[in-house]
Amino acid sequence: MSNQDQHTPVSLRGLNADDPHMQPAARRPRIVEGWIGFLFLLGIALLVLFAVAFVMNLAPWTLGATLGGGAVSLGAGLIAWGKYLMPRGPFVEERHPLANSDEDRDAFAAAIVERGGGIIQRRKFLGGLLGTGMGVFGVVSLFPLVRSLGPMPKGTLFHTDWTSGSYLVDITGRRVNVTDLAIGSITTVYPEGFENTDNGQAVDQTVLIRISNESFTTMKGRETWAPQGYVAYSKLCTHLGCPVGLYEQQLQLLVCPCHQSMFNVANGAIPNFGPAPRPLPQLPLMVDSNGYLQSQSDYKEPVGPGFWERS
């Protein structure tokens, strides 16, 4: 190591635009800072376009181009900042004495006064752009995660597509008449128009059973819910949501095939056996002037298992 290198002050390397160790581009910092600012602004704009394209569900190549272009622009700006605007070596320091001389300290202070103010002010602007770009990138990167969770449940956790006056139809869409089922028969029904709803065949599934020819009451307060011997319950087991599709006529029990929970259809589908924690929700029925079965309203409680589960 030469004596000249041994006595070169550390503080002046990287701050002097005439330093031979600096990149040629770094000798024109305003131009470099302008290009870096442009890259940051371009990256932010592309990321915002990605967010708009994602919300509008545009073509995949548009999503890839905007997200990739935004990330590349931010990365290129950050790399250029580190390469052209940060002090560069090699840096050497005299070993003895450890303290800088008065001349070195005066030279460092003069360099800071001459260039430091401009550096700090301009780099604050670039730092703000970089922070904004990284913030936008962090936000838009959550968009795919949120979309992958599916649509918001809204009121579907508490309500089905059954409404007051909904006609009971079979899987083919044919309305069910009171003359269709014999005593002891069971079928799965849906609200008319179910194929055009968001819930479709999921939470709307209902088992319709004809227990007798006479109207009866399953529980107090449900005196009009089972006209002409017809009773309807949600088909979703309150244990794990399996389809309750087996019916034992003599015992009047609905049976879940998954874990053998049994529900007495004559007394409100209270579970007699198995892990089901609560009765199957009952759908209140009525008959129109032509003998077709309709629902009086939606279920009075949420169907199936879930966070509403209670003992």
Image (tube, grey):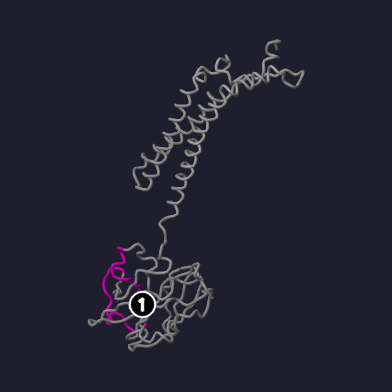
Q: Which residues are magenta?
A: 171-196
Q: Which residue is mark 1?
A: 208
Residue 211 point in image, percent of width and height: 37, 84
In the rendered image, the residue lying farthest to the right is 96
Residue drawn at x 46%, y 68% as measured from the top left:
241
Q: Is residue 149 above or below residue 280?
A: above
Give the structural element (helix, strand or loop) at label 1.
strand
Q: Is residue 1 above or below residue 48?
A: above
Helix, strand or loop: magenta stretch:
loop
Q: Please check the rendered image and state whether residue 85 is part of the magenta-colored stretch, yes or no.
A: no
Viewer-closest of 164 and 139:
139
Q: Is residue 239 left or right of residue 111?
A: left
Q: Is residue 79 left or right of residue 99?
A: left
Q: Quadrant of the C terminus?
A: bottom right
Residue 181 point in image, percent of width and height: 31, 80
- Quadrant assignment, res 298: bottom left
Say which amino acid is labelled 1. Leu
Q: Dot 1: few (<14), some (14–19), or many (≥20) neighbours within 10 Å? A: many
Residue 34 point in image, percent of width and height: 45, 27
Number of marks present in the image shown? 1
- Quadrant assignment, res 62: top left
Q: Is residue 222 left or right of residue 311?
A: left
Viewer-closest of 40 and 104:
104
Viewer-closest of 79 and 109:
109
Residue 291 point in image, percent of width and height: 25, 82
Q: Quadrant of the N terminus?
A: top right
Q: Is residue 181 above or below residue 54?
A: below
Q: Please check the rendered image and state whether residue 191 is part of the magenta-colored stretch, yes or no.
A: yes
